[in-house]
Amino acid sequence: MRKSSSPSPKTLFKIFATAEAITWAGLIAALIVRAVADLDLVRIAGGIHGFVFLSYCTVTVFVWVNQKWPTAVGVTGLLLSIIPFATVPFDIAIDRKGLLAGGWRLAPDGDKPQNFVEKTQAWVLRNPLVAVLLLAVFVTVLFLVLLFAGPPIPQS
């Protein structure tokens, strides 16, 4: 397998696990500020956290496929994203178990993809710029749909 200039699965996962926890802190801080002051930053902090949450979930599935995690590990990684700050201890635990070791196994000159999910991941690893743009558009559209699909937020 050739050396890639892209971040390793371990680096990518750590970045998003940490970002998810940081945006949880921002959202909680915004809720506290709204409760004690006449300043509502929840919509902004919530929007940022929602975007990072969706990105973390996407990265978790991507790394799960690459690392061939057992289903329980992948599902746990996704579920822990809804608990404030839980992605960081999860990241540390799976790293200690060696579940983040290695590079992108489906990168060019790597393993041959076996199914639709692996073929998709192999395509992403061969076309990272296009994939990042498509993913950014997908996450943005999903975020906007989720943001505007709910009931209107009453103005105070």
Image (cartoon, rainbow, N blue to C red):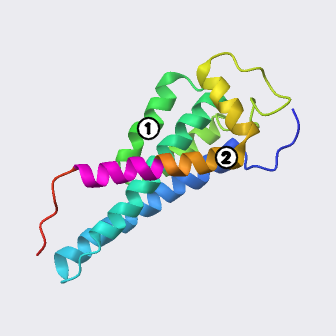
Residue lying farthest top?
114
Which numbered marker is on residue 130? 2
Main secondary-structure element of the magenta-colored stretch: helix
Name the N-terminal-most of marks 1 and 2: 1
Residue at image coords 59%, 24% = 117
Q: Is residue 110 left or right of residue 141?
A: right
Residue type (three-letter) at the residue carrying disc 2:
Val
Residue type (three-letter) at the residue carrying disc 1:
Leu
Q: Residues within 10 Å of mark 2 (few under 14, many from 20)?
A: few
Residue 14 visible in the picture: yes
The x and y percentages for residue 130 are 67, 46
The x and y percentages for residue 145 are 33, 49
Residue at image coords 44%, 38% = 78
Residue at image coords 23%, 81% = 39
The x and y percentages for residue 129 are 70, 49
Write down the residue under mark 1.
78
Q: Secondary structure at mark 1?
A: helix
- Number of numbered tags placed on the structure image: 2
Residue 68 visible in the picture: no
Q: Is 28 rendered above or below residue 65? A: below
Magenta segment range?
A: 139-149
Q: Secondary structure at mark 2?
A: helix
